[in-house]
């Protein structure tokens, strides 16, 4: 299950659970140029990924979290765009595989870019990685937004 918690409109926390146990967490924040300077979200690099952590034995959890993060970005007016700082060489490889591009110390993702047309798809108001579109999913996801409604889908591990 993926749960999205929105206590503050500038912050979003996404948790991923398998059999009611946490296996991943991703925290999003409004970029400073939007929150402090009032820049239109369409003119910013995207929501800032402040933290991402996955259980060491998990497979595909990071991808699930980034799908949800891109969708949250879309819903907040950032067109699915995300930005982050890569901490390790290993994480840089993962971010490149997801379609992030290095821009100085920051890495940015624009799932709608021409470079990412073979990686990302926007269907049913949700960003999805194309490599998962044909897979049946074994974990239940429930995304809770401001309205309290939930959506469910199924996913199997990679």
Image: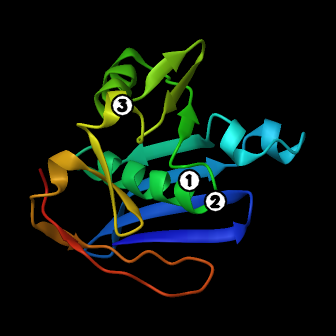
Q: How far apart are marks 1 and 2 (CA)?
A: 5 Å
**Does the rendering let one see residue 59?**
no
Q: Which of marks 2 and 3 is in front?
A: 3
Left or right: 8 in relation to 4: right
Q: Which residue is drawn at 50% across and 61% down?
A: 14
- Marks 1 and 2 close (CB-CB < 8 Å): yes
Looking at the picture, tell me which residue is in the foreground, 23 or 126.
Answer: 126
- Marks 2 and 3 close (CB-CB < 8 Å): no
Percent coordinates x, y for residue 4 in the rendering: 51, 69
Q: Distance between the residues labelled 3 and 1?
A: 18 Å
Look at mark 3 in the image and give the residue it sits on.
Answer: 114
Q: Which is nearer the N-term, disc 2 or disc 3?
A: 2
Q: Any mark on residue 7, and which?
A: none
Q: Which is nearer the N-term, disc 3 or disc 1?
A: 1
Look at mark 1 in the image and give the residue it sits on.
Answer: 73
Q: Is residue 12 above or below residue 88?
A: below
Look at mark 2 in the image and give the residue it sits on.
Answer: 76
Label 3 sits on a secondary structure element that is helix
Q: Please, which colouring scheme is shown? A: rainbow
Q: Tell me if mark 1 has few (under 14), some (14-19) or many (20+) residues whose alpha carbon lies within 10 angstroms of its own.
A: many
Q: Residue at x 40, y 48 (%)?
A: 66
Looking at the picture, tell me which residue is in the foreground, 58 or 70.
Answer: 70
Outermost residue, right side: 37
């Amino acid at each position: 299950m993926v749960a999205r918690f929105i206590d503050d409109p500038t912050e979003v926390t996404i948790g991923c659970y398998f059999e009611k146990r946490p296996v991943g967490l991703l925290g999003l924040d409004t970029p400073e140029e939007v929150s402090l300077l009032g820049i239109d979200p369409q003119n910013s690099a995207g929501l800032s990924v402040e933290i991402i952590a996955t259980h060491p034995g998990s497979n595909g959890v990071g991808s699930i979290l980034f799908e949800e993060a891109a969708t949250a970005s879309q819903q907040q007016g950032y067109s699915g765009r995300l930005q982050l700082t890569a901490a390790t060489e290993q994480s840089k490889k993962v971010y490149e595989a997801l379609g992030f591009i290095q821009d100085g110390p920051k890495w940015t993702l624009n799932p709608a870019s021409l470079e990412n047309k073979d990686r990302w798809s926007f269907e049913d108001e949700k960003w999805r990685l194309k490599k998962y579109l044909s897979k049946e999913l074994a974990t239940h996801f429930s995304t809770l937004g401001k309205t309290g409604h939930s959506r469910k889908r199924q996913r199997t591990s990679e």
